[in-house]
Image (tube, grey):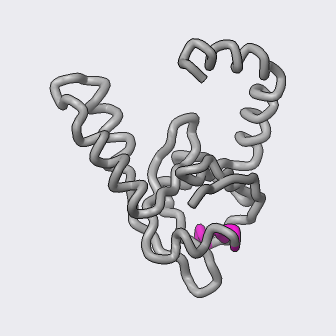
Amino acid sequence: MAFIGEYKHSIDDKGRLAVPAKFRSDLSQHAVITRGLDKCLYVFTQPEWEQMAQKIKAMPFTNPNARSFQRLMLAGASEVELDSQGRVLVPEFLRTYAGLKKMAVIAGVYSRLEIWDEDAWNADKAKIESAPSEIAERLGELGI
């Protein structure tokens, strides 16, 4: 299972968002949606979420940054299911966090999906596309 690609979908008045058809079988059992970094939302399959949650849980609660990250990811998490039309209901507090309006972009980033407000996605993508060499150079320091 690998999520890749970029898809644009509308959010209906009830806060439902269609999941791209190619991802539906991987999310058909249960999925977890939570606050992501960069003001987007993350969607994990249940197995991926369990791995992530175990890593977050293992962080030292005596560290204030660890506690903040635990709150961001765990307290903001919500189990979701796809409806018969392949849509997921995005909780209102998560829509507010990500600034989701009418149009959203669902980006496959291998082990998770990211849900972005279309305008925020376009701005972030433009920033990335304007300096790919600089980003690649910084990633070289991480061994990539």
How many marks are shown on the rendered structure?
Answer: 0
Q: Nearer the viewer, residue 102 or 86?
A: 86
Is 124 magenta? The answer is no
Query: The C terminus appears in which quarter of the rendering?
Result: top right
Residue 96 makes an appearance in the image: no
Side of 24 relative to 37 (left or right): right
Residue sitting at x 31%, y 32%: 68
Residue sitting at x 39%, y 66%: 79
- Residue 111 to residue 123: above or below: below
Residue 143 makes an appearance in the image: yes
Q: Nearer the viewer, residue 106 or 142?
A: 142
- Span highlighted in magenta in the image: 14-21
Residue sitting at x 37%, y 47%: 52
Image x and y of residue 33, in percent: 47, 58
Is 18 magenta? The answer is yes
Image x and y of residue 75, in percent: 32, 49
- Residue 42 to residue 14: above or below: above
